[in-house]
Amino acid sequence: MARTRTLAAAIAAVVLAAPAEAQMTVEIHNTATDETLGSVTLEEEAGGGVRFTPDLDGILPVGDHGFHAHLNPDCGSGGQAAGGHYDPANTGVHEGPGGNGHLGDLPRLTSDGGRVTAAVVAPRLTLSDLYGRALVIHEGGDNYSDSPSPLGGGGARLACGVVATGTPVMPPAALAALMALLLAIAAQARRRPAAVGDQG
Ligand SMILES: [Cu+2]
């Protein structure tokens, strides 16, 4: 029974130690050369939304670049393997971060001499929306519209990075139920007389 209690305590310790991701860092690569261009750090905002803090170099030309969460966690084939904009509600429209279209429509990034460091916030997202997606930076800007060009007019997929799957968050109710189960198992083990040979 000591063994059962130890096991229950060990499982509980592992469950309690598993953190919800507070932030994640995504490495960004040039889709043509696979060269690393830096990273983007994702953090959930206290008041809602996700903050994207880039630390990138070699994003050219200078000026605005379309920036989106695309569906697939794959940057292959020049970024095309990432698929379309993440759009879980199947809106089929590109309206930018403040609109009601693709959930993956992020605020534009701006290159200053190739460097991109200014943070942007996408107000409708949660961090878990981004698990297992790809972040894509386009060659051109983004007018947050499908007109005159589709998908903001950003054109070629210049750079891309895959967002990891992340640690699933256990809801408090599920955690409480698991703890109750473990305590019940431990209590039952305490009541049961030790069987012959159950000495270890
Ligand atoms: Cu895109």
Image (spheres, rainbow, N blue to C red):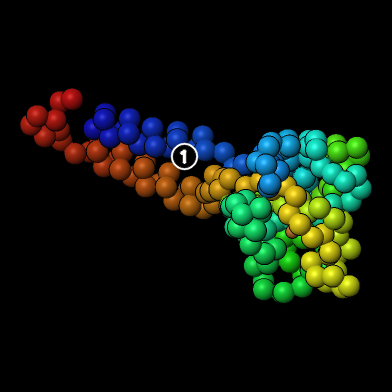
- Residue type (three-letter) at the residue carrying disc 1: Val
Q: Quadrant of the N terminus?
A: top left
Q: Secondary structure at mark 1?
A: helix
The residue located at (18%, 25%) in the rendering is 200
Question: Residue 186: percent from the left, percent from the top?
Answer: 31, 38
- Percent x, y for residue 78? 66, 53
Q: Quadrant of residue 102?
A: bottom right
26 vs 195, left or right, is right
Left or right, 153 with respect to 14, comes to right
Q: Quadrant of ligand 1?
A: bottom right
Question: Do we see residue 22 in this rendering?
Answer: no
Q: Is residue 139 visible?
A: yes
> What is the quadrant of residue 126 in the picture?
bottom right
Q: 26 or 1: nearer the eye?
A: 26
Q: Measuring 72% from the left and 60% from the top, which residue is drawn there? A: 104
Residue 70 falls in image quadrant: bottom right
Image: 152 above or below 139: below
Q: Nearer the viewer, residue 143 or 2?
A: 143
> What residue appears at the point 68 percent right and 37 percent down from the top-left corner?
35
Q: Give whichever of 107, 59 is nearer the camera.
A: 59
Residue at mark 1: 15
Local crowd at mark 1 within 10 Å, few (<14), some, or many (≥20)? some
